[in-house]
Structure formats: structure tokens, C-alpha cells
Image: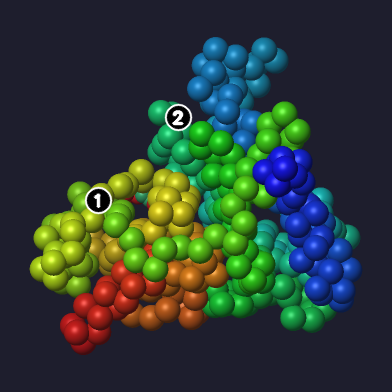
């Protein structure tokens, strides 16, 4: 029976990455090792997030434990976990985390050829009410064996080697691209393994959902306002789009990838560069969207072409189904 055969052919993320890597014999397993350390970080954070609602009872994040030590908040804990996991992989040189002002240069004895940019726990305003949150990451490779410098990570998103996110939701889902399509894995808690559940994700060419914080509408620019108006009151005979907005980028982007439509965090008069960070929010998500057949646009250019000039730079972002983003691009082009 085919369905049974599929059910028992558990494609784990490790086996999957090993397969991919066999196409690049020169990488000698380094990428697989780096990725297995990222996966470990995700599993650890997943288990901490699952217990977060019990924190007050059992003394987890933000509480004082039995030894009288102040327990770490979940976002701080997640950051520490990822930094330790990445350093101990022995495959990284520079780490950039949303939680740390400065880049972390790995000590020489643990250095490797990759640089990782990440947001260890994005959407933290959603933690206390149990709504989905996630980890976002992007991976660059150093070009040669030079002493690591900040320019190694201030690179356009199109230079990323891989990108992904892990969503801590009703299930724990890891979505990743190494530059040849997008694949999604779900953590089987009883096995402790990520199993391929969403092979070769392709975003629908056009979607029926728009996702934006509409509370900022009074400060939007013309094209953003015109686009959202069009979603609600289409004039071309198409039906109006539904609005879905969680306020957790990982969850909003995950839904957009699977169901299609657009996610936008545009510029507004109060924040002319939008809110989301280029290196570890905009780039990884744009990388995934393009790999899934969608597009990502800043209001000026293809998001992955941006050249960041500082670590925590922000950019407006419009990402989603190919045809929907074409419409947004046309509105911005008409304004020029
Ligand atoms: P954070 O890094 O402080 O958690 O903020 C990022 C989050 C994203 O997950 C989400 O897309 C966005 O902020 C929501 O912002 P807003 O509350 O302004 O709609
Ligand atoms: Mg964030």
C-alpha cells in the first residue's frame, strides 16, 4: 500500500540535508553539521516555548527558581541557546542576533566558514498569550580563509547560501531552503526528529489573503494605501481578499507560503524604513519566498538585492504570491 509506504519512509531533516550535500562533495559535511546544530537549537526552544504557559507554576522564564536564581526570559534563553549551539558547531565565524547590538566573532579555535544571522525568538509580544512565535535564520559562507570582518555579513540577501525559520505553533515546523526549492519538516515530539511533511513548497501564483497591521493605515504612503484599498474594494471584478494578521512574522509568512497572498510591513510616516530587520527577518523570508516561486519587494527594489550598511538595518517589505506582488510593484512604479 503506497500510503503506508510513504508513512514509514520517514525522511528526517538530517537525511534530507545529507542527500542535498552529496551534490556538493566539496562541502565535506560542514553544512550538515551546522544545520544539525541549528536544528538542536530549534528543538530546545520548542520545548521551552511549550512549557512557557506553565512558567508561573514551575518557575521558568522570568521567575526565581528554587536555587533563588533569576530565571531567564524566553527570548534571552533562546538567544543563549542558539549562540551556544552555533559556536559549538565549530562551523561559524560571525553570528548576528536580533538580541545583540554587536556582531559576535567566534573565538579562533571554534571558527568555521559560515556566518549565521538570526532572530532567536521573533514575535515575542505573542509569548504570553500562547500565540505562534518562531526563530528565523540565514546563512552566508565566507569566501576564503581571511580573518572574519563585519563585511562578511553585510551582504545582499541573494548571497545567502540557505535560509529558514522554525515556527513554534500548534506543531513545531521547520521550513528551509538551501537554494533549490523550499521544504518543510514537522517535529515528531515522540521521536524528537523533524520529518519531511511539506516537500517542495510552491506558493500559489495569486492569493486571496492580505496580511498587514492596518492600525498604521493613517501613516501609509500612497501605493500601500492604494493596494490595501484594492484588496478590500477590487475594481476589476475579482473578489475582495480576506485579512489575516497574527503579528508574528513567522506565522504570517508561513501561512502566506502555504495559502498564497501577501504579507506586508510597509514604510509609514512614523517609521520610514518600516519595522522589520533586513538581515535576519527580511532576507531569510525573501529568500524562501523566491525559492517557492513568489516575490519579495521593498517598495523600491527586489528585497534580496538590498545591500545592508548596518547590522540592525530595517526595510519595508512586501512579500507573497508572484502576481499579487506584481500589482504592488506596478503601484510603486506608477508613483515615480
Ligand atoms: P519583534 O522582533 O520585536 O518580535 O518584532 C517583530 C514582529 C514580527 O514578528 C511581526 O511581523 C511584527 O513585529 C508585527 O509588528 P506590529 O505589532 O507593529 O504589527
Ligand atoms: Mg524580530
- Which quarter of the picture shows residue 335? bottom left
Mark 1 vs 2, N-terminal side: 2
Residue at figure coordinates x 55%, y 73% from the top left: 157
Residue at image mark 2:
130
Q: Are marks 1 and 2 in contact (CB under 8 Å)?
A: no
Residue projecting furthest to the front: 1
The residue nearer to you, when weighing 266 against 15, is 15
Mark 2 closeness class: few <14, some 14–19, many ≥20 residues within 10 Å: some
- Which quarter of the picture shows residue 211? bottom left
- Across the whole image, how many numbered discs are drawn on residues? 2
Residue at image mark 1:
242
Confirm whether residue 118 shows in the render. no
In this view, the mark in front (1 or 2): 1
| 103 to 291, vertically: above or below | above
| 91 to 308, vertically: above or below | above
Q: Is residue 154 left or right of residue 304?
A: right
Residue at figure coordinates x 34%, y 73% from the top left: 323
Quarter of the image where the N terminus is located? top right
The residue nearer to you, when weighing 262 against 125, is 262
Amino acid at each position: 500500500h503506497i500510503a503506508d509506504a510513504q508513512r514509514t519512509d520517514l525522511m528526517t531533516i538530517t537525511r534530507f540535508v545529507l542527500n542535498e550535500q552529496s551534490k556538493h562533495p566539496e562541502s565535506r559535511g560542514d553544512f550538515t553539521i551546522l544545520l544539525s546544530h541549528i536544528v538542536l537549537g530549534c528543538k530546545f526552544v520548542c520545548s521551552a516555548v511549550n512549557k512557557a504557559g506553565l512558567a508561573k507554576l514551575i518557575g521558568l522564564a522570568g521567575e526565581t527558581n528554587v536555587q533563588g536564581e533569576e530565571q531567564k526570559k524566553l527570548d534571552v534563553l533562546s538567544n543563549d541557546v542558539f549562540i551556544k549551539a552555533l559556536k559549538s558547531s565549530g562551523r561559524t565565524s560571525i553570528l548576528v542576533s536580533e538580541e545583540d547590538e554587536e556582531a559576535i566573532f567566534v573565538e579562533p579555535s571554534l571558527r568555521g566558514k559560515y556566518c549565521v544571522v538570526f532572530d532567536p525568538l521573533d514575535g515575542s509580544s505573542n509569548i504570553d498569550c500562547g500565540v505562534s512565535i518562531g526563530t528565523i535564520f540565514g546563512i552566508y559562507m565566507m569566501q576564503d580563509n581571511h580573518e572574519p570582518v563585519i563585511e562578511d555579513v553585510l551582504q545582499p540577501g541573494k548571497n545567502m547560501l540557505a535560509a529558514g525559520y522554525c515556527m513554534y505553533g500548534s506543531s513545531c515546523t521547520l521550513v528551509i531552503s538551501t537554494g533549490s526549492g523550499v521544504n518543510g519538516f514537522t517535529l515528531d515530539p515522540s521521536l524528537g526528529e523533524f520529518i519531511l511533511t511539506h516537500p517542495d513548497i510552491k506558493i500559489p501564483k495569486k492569493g486571496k489573503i492580505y496580511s498587514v497591521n492596518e492600525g498604521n493605515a493613517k501613516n501609509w504612503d500612497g501605493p500601500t494605501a492604494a493596494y490595501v484599498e484594492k484588496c478590500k474594494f477590487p475594481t476589476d471584478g475579482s473578489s475582495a481578499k480576506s485579512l489575516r494578521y497574527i503579528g508574528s512574522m513567522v506565522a504570517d509568512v508561513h501561512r502566506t507560503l502555504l495559502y498564497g497572498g501577501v504579507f506586508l510591513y510597509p514604510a509609514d510616516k512614523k517609521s520610514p524604513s518600516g519595522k522589520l530587520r533586513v538581515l535576519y527577518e527580511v532576507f531569510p523570508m525573501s529568500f524562501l519566498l523566491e525559492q517557492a516561486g513568489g516575490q519579495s519587494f521593498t517598495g523600491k527594489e527586489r528585497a534580496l538585492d538590498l545591500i545592508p550598511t548596518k547590522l540592525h538595518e530595517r526595510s519595508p517589505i512586501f512579500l507573497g504570491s508572484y502576481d499579487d506582488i506584481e500589482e504592488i510593484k506596478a503601484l510603486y512604479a506608477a508613483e515615480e
